[in-house]
Amino acid sequence: MPYPTSSNRLVAMLGGYVKRRVLRHLLLYLALMLLVVWGLVAVEQARFAELAETGGKSNVQNLSRAFSEEVKATVGLIDLSLVQLRGTWQRDPADFAQGVAEHARHLRIPIHFTVTDAAGRLLYTNDGAGPPGLALGELPEFAIHRTQAGDRLYIGRPEKHRVSGQWSIQFTRPIRDAGGRLTGVIAAAVPPSYFLRFYDSIDLGPDAAVSLMRLDGTIIARSSRPDGEHYMGINMAQAPHIRAKGNSGMFRKVSILDGIDRIFAWYKMPDYGLVVTVGQAVHDAEARFNQQSAMMRNVGVVVSLVLGLLGWAAIGAADRRRRALRALAAAEARWKLALNAAGDGVWDCDVTRGTALLSPSAQRILDSEHATVSWFGSKGMAELVHPDDIDAVRTTLRDHIDGITPDYAMVHRIRMRDGSWRWIEARGTVTERGERNEPLRMVGTFSNIDARKQEEERMRRMAHEDPLTKLPNRVLLDDRMRQAIRVAARDGHKVGLIYFDLDKFKPVNDTYGHAVGDRLLCMVAERVRGVLRESDTLARVGGDEFAVLLPRCAQAQDTERVAAAILACLEQPFIDGPRELHISGSIGYAMYPDCGDDGEALLHCADLAMYDAKAHGRNRISGSYRTRVG
C-alpha cells in the first residue's frame, strides 16, 4: 500500500528532514547537547560573583598605580620648573618674566608662578602685579621654609589663591643665598582639577571616586560623579590607607564622605608626601556581573537554537554529504592522473580538506618530501610561508576564493627544509564550486624566482647603501626624510636631523693612508649607531660627513640630547691595531617644521648649523633650527 503524499507544501519541501527517525535522533542529540550547554551556563554564572569582585580589585589596583605614575610625572615636572626658574631668579631677576613665559609655552599644565621675599612680601606673579603690599608670609606653604633648613619641595593644602582668587594647590621651594640664608620663596599654583583629569579617562561605573591626599590625610583633590570637588581640605587622618605602613594596598569601606560602599586601592608616594586612591562602588561591580549573567542566559538561548538548527540540518544532509564525498574522490583520481603528466610546478588543492597535491616539479620548488602538503589550514600555511608574507598570502587567497579577484597571484617566500627561504611566484584559480558557490578545488602553478629576487635586492642595495660602511646613502636618507615629514605633518610632531663631520679626519687619512681612514669611518658608523634608536636612521652623505634622522621628536632638546651622545662617543679614542686614533665632531641639527617644509630645507639648515659649529672652534654642537629656510 503506497504512502499518501502530504498536501502541505512545507512538509513536501523539507522531505526527509521531518521523517520520524530523523526527528528521534534530533531529540536525542538535543537532550545531550542542551544538558551540556545549560550546565556550562550555570557554572559560569556561579563564577561571575567571584570574578566581579576580583575584577573590581584588579581594576582599581591597576588604575591606582597608573594614577600615581601620572601624579608623580606631574609633580616632578612642576618641581623641575621651580628649580629651573629659581636659578633664573637668582642669576638675573630681570629675565625672570621671560623665563616664566618660556616655561608656559612648553608646559601643558595650567600653572601660576609666584616669588616672595624672606618676609613673605610678593615680588613677582605671572597673574599680574597683585594687590599693593600683598603679604603671603603667614601662609603655611611659605612660612614653613623659614622654620626648616635645607631645600625641599613643600605641597600645601588646597586654598583660594591670594592673587588669582581661584582654588589652587601651592608647590613651594626656598630661595637661599650661597651661605644658606633664606632670601625668598618661589611657588607654583596648580588647580586641583588638573590632577583629576585622570577621572574622566576611567570607566568604573557611575559612583567611582579618585582622590589625591597628603600623607597627613588632607584631601588635596577628590572627584566622583555625585559630589565633584566638594571635599578639598578635609582631613582623613584615620583612613586605613593613611595609617598603613606599606606603600600600596586595598581595602573595602563605606565612605564617610558620601556613604557609598567602595573597593579602594591606594598607592603612596613618600618622596612627595602624597597618596592616591581609586575606588569602585560595590554596586557598580555587581551591576556588571548582572549584565554578564543576563548576557550568558541569552547566549544559552541562542546557542540552544543554533545547535538545534545545525543538528537538524546535519542529520538531514547526511546523504548529500556522502554524494559530495564520492564526487570528490572521483575528481581526485582524475586530477592525480593530470598532475603526473603536467609540466613544471603544478599544484592541485582540495579546498574542503585544505591540502594541496604537488607535481614532482612543484615538490622540488617547495623542497617538500611529500607530494601532499597542508596549505589552506592555518598551521600548514604558517609552517611554509614566511611570517612577513603570511597575512598578504591569506588575504589575496581569500579575495580570489570569495570571487573578488578573477585569479590568485602572489609572490612570497617559502621555507626550505634546511631553514632557508626561497622566493616563489604562485598562481592559481578556483576550478570547481559547490551548489552554494563554495570553493571545492583550486589548481595553479609554482615558479622559482629566487635568483630574480636576489638580483633585485642586490640592485636595491647598490642604489640605497653606502658600499664602505653599509649605511643608508643620501638617496635612501632623502626618501626616509620625506616619509618622516609626511607622518609628522599628519600627526603633529617634530622631525629632527643631525648633520656632522669628523674633525681631524684628514690628518689621519694623510698620515696613515686611506685604508686606515676607511676602517676609521666604519668604526665611527658602528659606534654612532650604538647610541641611536632602532627607528632612527644613520646615513653617510659624504666623505667624512654623516646625517642622523630622528623621525619622531617632541622638542628640540630631544635632538640636542642625541647630538650630545654622538659627540661624546666621537671623543673616545678609536683603536686600530697598534694605533690609537683621536678625532672629534662638528655637529649641527635642525627641526621640522621649524626650519622648513621639506627634506632639502631641513638638510640645508642642519648643514649651516654644522658649519656654525666649525666656525666656533669645532668639537661642539650648534642648533640652527630657529632659522627657517624655504
Image (cartoon, rainbow, N blue to C red):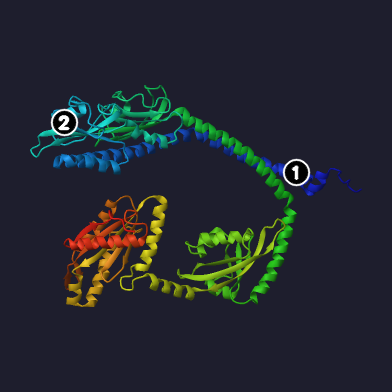
Q: Residue at position x 28%, y 30% from top?
A: 169
Q: Is residue 309 visible?
A: yes
Q: Position of residue 37 (x, y in %)?
A: 61, 40
- Report whether 580 appears left or right of 316: left
Q: Residue at position x 33%, y 29% from top?
A: 221
- Looking at marks 2 and 1 on the same chain, the residue that comes earlier in the sequence is marked by 1
Q: Position of residue 293 (x, y in %)?
A: 55, 34
In the image, residue 626 above or below residue 409? above
Q: Residue at position x 51%, y 74% from top?
A: 449
Q: In the image shown, does 80 or 105 lie closer to the viewer?
A: 105
Residue that carries the numbered disc 1 in the rendered image: 23
Q: Amino acid at mark 1?
A: Leu
Q: Quadrant of residue 381?
A: bottom right
**Callout 1 environment at 10 Å: few (<14), some (14 to 19), or many (20+)?**
some
In the image, residue 253 above or below residue 455? above
- Report whether 95 appears left or right of 36: left
Q: Which mark is residue 145?
A: 2
Q: In the image shown, does 594 or 359 lie closer to the viewer?
A: 594
Q: Element type at marker 2?
A: helix
**Callout 2 environment at 10 Å: few (<14), some (14 to 19), or many (20+)?**
many
Q: CA distance from mark 2 to mark 1?
A: 89 Å
Q: Residue furthest front?
A: 630
Q: Is residue 353 visible?
A: no
Q: Element type at marker 1?
A: helix
